[in-house]
Image (tube, rainbow, N blue to C red):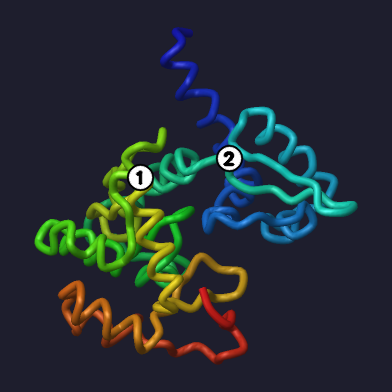
Amino acid sequence: MTEPSYRIAFPASLLADPTRAAIVLALMDGRSRSAKKLALDAGVTPQTASAHLRKLVAARMLAWESRGRFKHFRLSGAEVADAVEALCQLGPDAVPGRVLTAAARELRFARCCYDHLAGQLGVAVTARLPTLGEGIFAELDIDLAALSALRRPLSRCCIDWTEQRPHIGGALGAALLAAYKDRRWFLTVVDSRRLEVTPQGRVAFIERFGVDARLFEGDGAISRPRAALSRAA
């Protein structure tokens, strides 16, 4: 097997296991979780989860840190999230006009893809950015020169898993989501990648970004009980 083939086949073989795939998907919001919580997410025993976690860490797909007596795991980097999001586009269900599952519909409007905004709103904002120009970044206190100096690519367009259209990732995508959160434009949903748009966020995305107001008429509205939401994103 040639080296390029192995670089594809090896990580793909790890994610081919449903338990390991479930563990990685549970970490796609960029946060860390304990081994016990990941075992619950994947529906396996802690012992089984530990074996899978060791393989994912050895493959450098996950990283861990010690918190007291427990280890907490997270994705090792944005490139892992980008690869997983891309894989979600493949397969028999990833075709135009497909019917999304209930789980996918839950995440469709706005969600975290590791550290940047994905979903219908992420795609809509990305489409508006070329029209807005660099002034919007200054307005959000984003230093493009500083981001350009990072080793991480400034921006990259990921084909959105649910929308089949691009949303922005890279250092700029991460900075944009951080700016939205700093301004309290989102609330997070407990134990979910889903993001709920606050009233001030809705106004900002419509008035400052020019996102079509009709986008917020359905899934964009905060409809969940407040108990299911964190205090702020």
Residue at 49 percent across and 17 percent down: it is 6
Considering only vertical position in the picture, is 205 above or below 67? below
Do the numbered discs 1 and 2 sit on residues whose CB atoms are within 8 Å?
no
Residue 125 found in image quarter? bottom left
Pick whichever, 105 or 85, lies toward us. Answer: 85
- Look at the numbered disc 1 and give the secondary structure of its residue: helix
Residue toward you, 37 or 43: 37
Identity of the residue furthest to the right in this view? 69
| Extreme residue toward the top, this view | 2
Q: Earlier in the sequence, mark 1 or mark 2?
A: 2
Identify the residue at the far left of this view: 131
Pick whichever, 179 or 110, lies toward us.
179
Rendered residue at 46%/55% (across/down): 115
- The circle on residue 147 is 1
Residue 91 visible in rendering? no
Asked if residue 99 shows in the view, the reply is yes
Viewer-nearest of discs 1 and 2: 1
Q: Quadrant of residue 134?
A: bottom left
Q: Nearer the viewer, residue 143 or 181?
A: 143
Compute the Cα span from label 1 to label 2: 20 Å
Callout 2, which amino acid?
Answer: Ser
At x 39% / y 78%, what residue is drawn?
A: 185
Residue 122 is marked as: none
Residue 135: x, y in percent? 18, 62
Check residue 76 in the rendering and tell me which mark sits there, or answer none: 2
Q: Is residue 55 left or right of residue 47?
A: left
Q: Say few, some or many: other residues with alpha carbon within 10 Å of mark 2 (under 14 / 14 to 19 / 20 or more).
A: some
User: In terms of secondary structure, where does tag 2 sit?
Assistant: loop
Horizontal placement of 166 versus 151: left or right? Answer: left
